[in-house]
Image: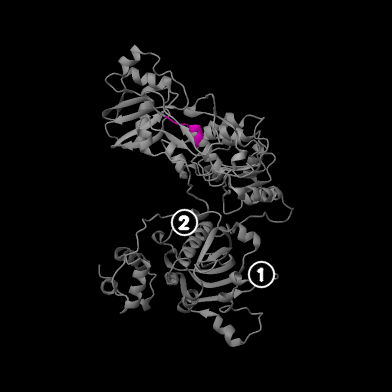
Amino acid sequence: MGNKSERTRARAWAQKRSPVYKSNVQISSKDLQRPGTDVYIQPPRAQSECKADSKKEIRNSGKNIQKLASQTGRTPISHSSVPSQDLPAAVTSTSGGSDAPNEVFDHTNEVTEVESTNEMVEVDSTNAAQLLAARPHILSDTTPDIWHKVTVKPAVVDRVAVLHAINRRISPLRLIPYFFSMEDGHITFLVNNCNAPLTTLFKQNLKVPFHSIQIEMKVQLRAKKLSLSAILQRIIYKRLSCEKTVLDLSYLISIPEFQQVVYDPSETSQLQQQLMKMVQGMAPNLISLSLAGNGLTTLSHLATIFGDKTKWHSLKVLDVTDNKIKTICDLAIFNSVPITELYLHKNPVCGKYKEDHSYISVIRVIFPHLAKLDETFLHRIPGLPRWRPNYILCSSPGDSAELADQFVEHFFVLYDSADRTWLHGLYHVDAYFSLSSMYLPGQSTSLNARLSSYVAECRNLLHPTNKLRLKAALCHGSEKVLTKLEKLPQTQHDPYSFTVDLLHHSAISTVLTVTGVFRERNSKQNISPRHFMRTFVLVRLANNEYQIVNDIMYITNATTAEAEDAFRYMKPETNLKKIRPLMRLREGDENSMIEMYSHLTNMTTEWSHKCLVTAGWDLRRALQTFIEMYEADKIPAGRFIKPKKSAKF
């Protein structure tokens, strides 16, 4: 467990969401490159379920806002589409970073067609200065939906370095590109409303020094006509709740539409500014806003937007977690907003304050109405400890929070896998395991809520039963523990439901509990979600590794509230792997592969077969998994034909 190659960090589960959103907006790179091509923007359809959800959310608005910022160290906010009848009739376009006339976006039609009617003019380094001298007003078109296409030659890979070179050439002016793409190995992008920067480049015949070479640009004037405001509007609608009170603009770069629009993923402040300007008109009664995970180093680009005291009067919840904010002064732009709930953790600024009281007092200077900070309620009864969603004992040696994160991630990834025997290395040779399971009073015991699989294996001491069964239900030894775990149903845990309490941590041992929700992988019937609590006692070994010496599991059916909140958010993949189709092999081919795998690994035929099945009969993948587990000493000796020895590679 101490080996970093064996595991990934648990924080990736609950603090680094990267949800994928689908949309009806389809703008391919070829469309952007082809002059005169029509672009179709399809507005969102009304969803009937929003009406039902609307009534429920209004009744429980205070409760929902508190849930909003509860999950696991950040504020996951539910996403829903907005009924079309509630959409505004007009939105102010801010394409290209400058103010533009109001653009009417008609939501009554099923499809809005955007046509290109302007004649394209192609300019390169041979005629740019000459054309500008002959036609001084050729770049004066400020229509927000008219875009010029720029192609950079020769072929250069680093788009960020190219943009920096261009902006150095025209400094103090600045060119703001959008819609990055590669065409035949050349960088291309679109610009609009950029008369002054383009004029400067035209005067220099579109030539820019770049390291030891000189890059040249080809510009197709009025090459495209498309509505950036419509695309940004679409992004907001997908992230805005039905009542237009909750908006999640976190991890924007994960949204396909946003990826298409942006040029440099590390610099999105201009688009964020345009989005927030549109939000002012589209959601005037916004209660909760999330800007988490957007790589914000400063908030100065939003100062004029949040500085308007006539706006944002209803905003109460703000989430800026997982950014790069370094000073408290950056938060001063919100001092006129009545924020009562703030999420700031996972920013460099938080590390500057070692004591809670100094951190809280500084924050309260800017947010005087604050009642909750980083999931912790600030108002408390004197004499009682401060409430926290996760309790981590910090007064012990070492990084106890890091240990808890690593263990939880590593354990539940392996536990939810198809083959739980990979957990063998986590359990001490003298480990104990016991399971308790019962129905809560008044809970339903319908077919999809029965706990038969767990009751048959449980060890409820208060239940009338014979002593032999109680003794048999207490598993002693890693082999017996693994046998018991393999009997239990296959599971999928919801990491956003986890609550972790690390109760004891020393140089010798650690005790922690994990509670949350999981569901069974059953394709035949829809099993209701389960509630679980597991208490782990870990013992420290050499090389700073830990093993489980006691595992106590308690399982019951999830409550109605837990079931409704479970699996709302997708766990992001921490290691994305290419999915290959399962190989279809004849029986003779399978036997040959099993024999080869057994020869190379010294594993028994039975376990060689299991490993290949788990790897989808991909020999390379199966061998790679074997090497990782072998080097970490996680393979039980009983799986080998002979006493454990080096594999034949």
Disc 2 vs disc 1: which is toward the camera?
A: 1
Tag on residue 9? 2
Name the amino acid type tagged 1: Ser
Q: Residues within 10 Å of mark 2 (few under 14, many from 20)?
A: some
Q: Residue at x 61, y 39 (%)?
A: 85
For residue 505, say whether it is visible.
Answer: no
For residue 89, say whether it is visible.
Answer: yes
Q: Earlier in the sequence, mark 2 or mark 1?
A: 2
* Quarter of the image where the C terminus is located: bottom left
Residue 336 within the magenta-colored segment of the rendering: no
* Quarter of the image where the N terminus is located: bottom left
Q: Which residues are magenta?
A: 225-231
Percent coordinates x, y for residue 199 in the rendering: 38, 18
Q: Secondary structure at mark 2?
A: loop
Q: Residues within 10 Å of mark 1 (few under 14, many from 20)?
A: few
Q: Are marks 2 and 1 in contact (CB under 8 Å)?
A: no
Q: Nearer the viewer, residue 580 or 631?
A: 580
Up-down relation of residue 401 to residue 355 (above or below): below
Name the amino acid type tagged 2: Arg
Up-down relation of residue 8 to residue 75 (above or below): below
Q: Residue at x 42, y 20 (%)?
A: 195
Residue carrying label 1: 444
